[in-house]
């Protein structure tokens, strides 16, 4: 039985647009995406190897300098920073995947089958959530090997893990929107400067007051800074509520802006030849 057959298998027992059909088909398609990710070397590189190498580089090259400047352990900023960067960079591989499926006709074949229309997008959401969770856990484990610790209990650790997942899903929505409306390979490269700019000018390196005055407004209000601040507060201590609320507002705003374009773009990509 092929993946397409498996996705459509529940139709004989349940109506195409029923909730049971949606759930069973989403599970089948999510499993397919996860298996494909495991078999794709670039997914491993972007989701695990490069972020771990980046974290080790920050620790070896900049760790002592940042500690000297700020008077605090640099890991409590760099580990959250790398976790966020990893979730963002991994989303670019998803852009490649959805464009490949459009070009080889997979999306069109899915649209012609008796499969719930929402199953394709929900399966991508599910697979992305699993990828983000695994990536965050790998970065957290690497940081703990280097000396990173949670000082606010298990509850703080769980919320800490949730932040990169939520942030990554919001960025994945943005990346998917870009892939659906600008199906060019250059869009993948175009996302990288956005990630680099956000990582460079945020509180993942030093507090906002250590930046030049002219750039502090950007550092304070861009979405990565409150996410880093919230994660730092959840690990070593500090403000949590305000940066957490700001992060959630940013993520909700991105979802709200991208939701309708994603649905329209996915339908257009599935029905176009």
Image: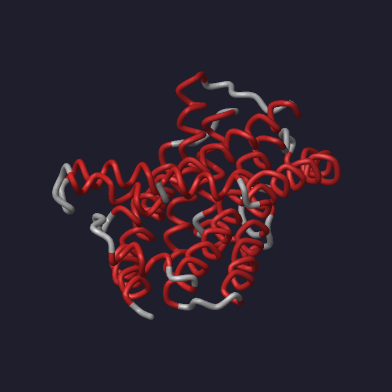
Q: Quadrant of residue 180?
A: bottom left
Q: Who is closer to the viewer here, 33 or 58?
A: 33
Q: Quadrant of residue 232?
A: top right
Q: Is residue 248 visible?
A: yes
Residue 91 vs 229, above or below: the answer is below
Left or right: where does residue 232 sit relative to residue 171?
Answer: right
Q: Quadrant of residue 170?
A: bottom left
Q: Who is closer to the viewer here, 228 or 214?
A: 228
Q: Who is closer to the viewer here, 16 or 67?
A: 16
Left or right: where does residue 219 sit relative to residue 13?
Answer: right
Q: Is residue 207 visible?
A: no
Q: How are the residues colored?
A: secondary structure
Residue 119: where, in percent of width, then height? 30, 53
At 64% from the left edge and 66% from the top edge, which residue is drawn? 192
Q: Who is closer to the viewer here, 81 or 185?
A: 185
At 35% from the left edge and 72% from the top edge, which residue is drawn? 265
Left or right: where does residue 35 sit relative to residue 199?
Answer: left
Residue 175: where, in percent of width, then height? 48, 64
Residue 67 vs 261, above or below: the answer is above
Residue 28: where, in percent of width, then height? 37, 44
């Amino acid at each position: 039985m092929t993946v397409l057959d498996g996705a459509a298998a529940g139709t004989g027992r349940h109506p195409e647009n029923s909730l049971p059909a949606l759930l069973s088909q989403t599970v089948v398609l999510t499993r397919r995406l996860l298996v494909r990710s495991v078999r794709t070397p670039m997914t491993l590189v972007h989701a695990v190897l490069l972020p771990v190498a980046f974290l080790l580089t920050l620790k070896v090259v900049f760790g002592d300098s940042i500690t000297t400047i700020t008077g605090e352990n640099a890991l409590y900023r760099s580990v959250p920073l790398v976790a966020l960067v990893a979730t963002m960079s991994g989303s670019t591989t998803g852009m490649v995947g959805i464009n490949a499926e459009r070009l080889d006709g997979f999306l069109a074949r899915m649209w012609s089958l008796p499969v719930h229309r929402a199953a394709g997008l929900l399966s991508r959401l599910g697979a992305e959530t699993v990828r983000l969770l695994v990536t965050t856990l790998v970065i957290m484990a690497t940081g703990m090997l280097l000396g990173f610790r949670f000082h606010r209990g298990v509850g703080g650790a769980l919320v800490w893990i949730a932040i990169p997942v939520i942030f990554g899903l919001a960025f994945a929505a943005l990346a998917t929107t870009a892939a659906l409306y600008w199906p060019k390979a250059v869009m993948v490269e175009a996302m990288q400067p956005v990630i680099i700019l956000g990582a460079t000018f945020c509180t993942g390196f030093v507090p906002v007051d250590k930046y030049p005055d002219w750039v502090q407004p950007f550092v304070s209000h861009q979405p990565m800074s409150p996410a880093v601040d919230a994660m730092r507060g959840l690990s070593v201590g500090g403000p949590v509520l305000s940066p957490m609320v700001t992060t959630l507002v940013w993520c909700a705003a991105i979802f709200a802006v991208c939701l309708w374009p994603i649905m329209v773009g996915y339908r257009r990509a599935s029905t176009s030849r």
